[in-house]
Image (cartoon, grey):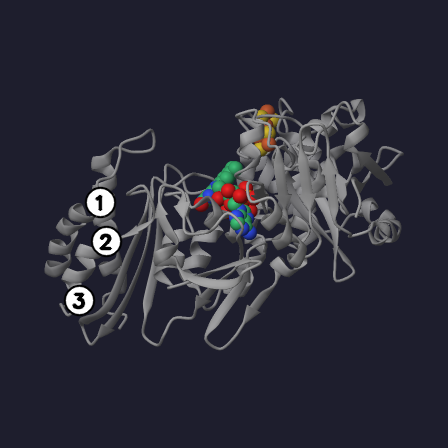
Amino acid sequence: MRSTISFILDGKIVDLDFKNSKQFSPTSTALNYLRSFPAHKGVKEGCAEGDCGACTVVLAELVDNKITFRAVDSCLIFLPMIHGKQLITVENLKTPEGILHPVQQSMVDLYGSQCGFCTPGIIMTMFAFYKNYDKPSREQIDDALTGNLCRCTGYRPIVEAAAKSCVHNCVDHFTNDESKIIKFLKSISKESIHIQTDNQKYFRPASLGEAISLKHQHPEAIIISGATDIALRVTKNHELLKEIIDLSGVEELKVITQTDSSIEIGAGVSLNDILLPIEKDFPALHEMLKIFGSHQIRNLATLGGNLGSASPIGDTLPILMAYNAGVVLESLNGRRVIPLNDYIIGYRKTVRKPDELITSIIIPKLTNGSIIKSYKVSKRKDLDISTLSACFRIDLDGSMVKSIILAYGGMAERTKRAFTAEQFLLGKQWERKIIEKAMTLIEKDFTPISDARGSAEFRLKAAQNLLLKFLIETKGTN
Ligand SMILES: Cc1cc2nc3c(=O)[nH]c(=O)nc-3n(C[C@H](O)[C@H](O)[C@H](O)COP(=O)(O)OP(=O)(O)OC[C@H]3O[C@@H](n4cnc5c(N)ncnc54)[C@H](O)[C@@H]3O)c2cc1C
Ligand code: FES
Ligand code: FES
């Protein structure tokens, strides 16, 4: 067990001992850490809540002995989360002789920067993109850039710069250091970390068994997986989080297992890592995850965290409900699987006991003939919070409704099904006149609230119209 963290910065291993640090606590963000050095002021703070991407850095880590590169928002990362990784900033991309990286050179050549505030963040997003894509499509470029806001240049030159650099016809000097970095990454111990300072305890267990024991000993401790929800308590509310159990080092939670009938997704798998395995069999979840937050958010955020927050506007919850998913909870007392329908019992309240961890989510594959669709209504498509969301699933016998699930988010204090409308539709014809009646029944199931994102009236109307949209999209497909 160790009480310090180690990571790579500027090509060297850095050891950080929080006990002896007056400047940094275990919940200091990577952003604030970097900005404390004159040589790393390129990373910017815009929003401190994951929305603007000005703070984007790249984390490199070893996966199956290969270095992977991921763009993340450094304002959402507590320092112990970078243990065992390489932290790459915009200052690291050019060579000591001043030769720019191809992504930087393309931005210069194509005039992709005006005031320059957003530019270092955009460069880092482009750098990770460059490392992961060859000759990307316009759609892939747009998707990669959704987490970076630029308010003066305009996106055309930025998109062109990304396209130009990702043709990979210039020398990438950054690869020069790779063998040294791999050696360094391998040399950092993966053992668990227990940090205790005067007013904080931060545990980063290295195994699931240890995580479960820690939660048993510290039931009040705050769990974090990707910290994309929890970090805001520090950056926006300025809370002191006294006890934290950080699951980001538990490899057992990052496993995906597929069988003929289901997929089991570890609670700690990042949402970006889920996208490919679910693409074929779980289209409704795939559609939603494609527009969940941004690349930077999806590189950190997890299903475990979305279920842990149990927010009424958590985007995956109506979908997991419609797929009849089960949440796997584990403690020293054993393992139980709770159907999504029974998991959430009130506003951000679930049946999870204080000593339990969410360890995985089991999602059954659709049975033959089932149709499922998900919808998100928000002010804009990307990187936005849902005003409401929905996932509908239907099994038809000819044109008669054999079974139906109408799950909604943003319509009540928790994710909820429209049971009255569901009951009405059972055994009825799947046709417009019946749906129009069912739409009026949605009112019996929900009394939505008005807030900055939409009025109660709008929410109700949109919820009703989504049902009609579902009919239009499904009629004739079965
Ligand atoms: C800019 C931005 C955009 C976002 N966009 C979306 C969006 O489009 N849709 C959406 O639904 N959400 C969105 N979110 C919210 C957030 O990203 C999601 O809720 C995400 O799934 C949280 O995952 P995490 O691993 O980061 O959770 P964390 O912040 O680590 O944890 C969230 C909660 O879950 C608990 N928890 C985490 N893991 C476990 C576990 N294994 N067992 C028990 N409890 C656990 C934590 O204690 C905490 O209460 C966004 C957030 C930001 C900052
Ligand atoms: S400062 Fe805006 S995303 Fe981090
Ligand atoms: S160049 Fe000014 S905000 Fe993007």
The amino acid type found where label 3 is placed reads Leu
Q: Using a 10 Å C-alpha cutoff, classify the residue at mark 3 as few (fewer than 14 neighbours), some (14 to 19) or many (20 or more).
A: some
The amino acid type found where label 2 is placed reads Ala
Badge 2 vs badge 1, beta-carbon distance below 8 Å? yes
Which badge, 2 or 1, comes first in the chain's sequence? Answer: 2
Residue denoted by label 1: 446
Quadrant of the image occupied by residue 243: top right
On residue 426, which mark appears? Answer: 3
Q: Using a 10 Å C-alpha cutoff, classify the residue at mark 1 as few (fewer than 14 neighbours), some (14 to 19) or many (20 or more).
A: many
* Residue at (77% x, 32% y) in the render: 18
* Residue at (59% x, 45% y) in the render: 226
SS at circle 1 = loop
Cα distance in 3D space between marks 2 and 1: 8 Å
The amino acid type found where label 1 is placed reads Phe
* Residue at (34% x, 51% y) in the render: 375
Badge 3 vs badge 1, beta-carbon distance below 8 Å? no
**Residue 137 appears in the picture as rendered:** no
Task: Locate residue 300, reporting x and y percent.
Answer: 59, 46
**Residue 214 appears in the picture as rendered:** yes
Please give left or right for residue 329 compared with residue 93 in the image. Answer: left
Which badge, 3 or 1, comes first in the chain's sequence? Answer: 3
Cα distance in 3D space between marks 3 and 2: 13 Å
Q: In this view, does 67 lie above or below 64?
A: above
Residue denoted by label 2: 418
